[in-house]
């Protein structure tokens, strides 16, 4: 959260500062928002970005498959 504020909300800067991917930053922000009691309205077919990143890190899907899933949002 501190890095996000220091970077003035620029996710690309947070990505560089923490050395993590853009979807991972988004997933972490979603977790923070949820912990604050806010519920994000999801589209009917929305893909959980955090799960996509996890699958990619485990080698269960390819980068191309991950990109396709994330673009389906």
Image (cartoon, rainbow, N blue to C red):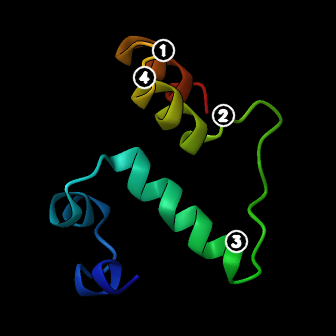
CB-based contact (under 8 Å), mark 3 and mark 2: no
Q: Residue at x 46, y 22 (%)?
A: 66
Determine which residue is flagged by label 1: 61
Q: Which mark is residue 47?
A: 2
| Comes first in the chain, label 4 or label 2 | 2
Q: Which residue is mark 4?
A: 67
Does label 3 or label 2 sit earlier along the sequence? 3
Q: Quadrant of residue 41?
A: bottom right
Q: In the image, is 39 to the left or to the right of 51? A: right
- Of the numbered discs 4 and 3, the one sitting upstream in the chain is 3
Residue tagged by mark 3? 34
Q: Kindly report which numbered mark, 4 or 3, lies closer to the viewer in this rendering.
A: 3
Q: Quadrant of residue 2?
A: bottom left
For image coordinates 69% across by 84% down, the residue present is 36
In the picture shown, does residue 72 fall above or below 2? above
| Horizontal arrangement in the rendering, residue 3 relative to residue 61 (left or right) | left
State the residue at coordinates (23%, 79%). Answer: 7
Q: What distance separates the C-alpha of mark 3 from that of mark 1? A: 27 Å
Q: In front of the other: label 2 or label 1?
A: 1
Q: Which corner quadrant holds the N terminus?
A: bottom left
On the rendered structure, is 10 left or right of 65? Answer: left
- Cα gap from disc 4 to disc 2, whole angstroms: 11 Å
State which mark lies toward you, 1 or 4.
Answer: 1
């Amino acid at each position: 959260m501190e890095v996000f504020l220091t970077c003035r909300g620029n996710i690309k800067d947070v990505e560089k500062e923490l050395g993590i991917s853009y979807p991972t930053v988004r997933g972490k922000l979603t977790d923070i928002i949820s912990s604050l009691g806010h519920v994000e309205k999801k589209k009917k077919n929305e893909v959980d970005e955090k799960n996509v990143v996890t699958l990619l890190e485990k080698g269960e899907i390819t980068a191309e498959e991950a990109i396709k899933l994330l673009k389906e949002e």
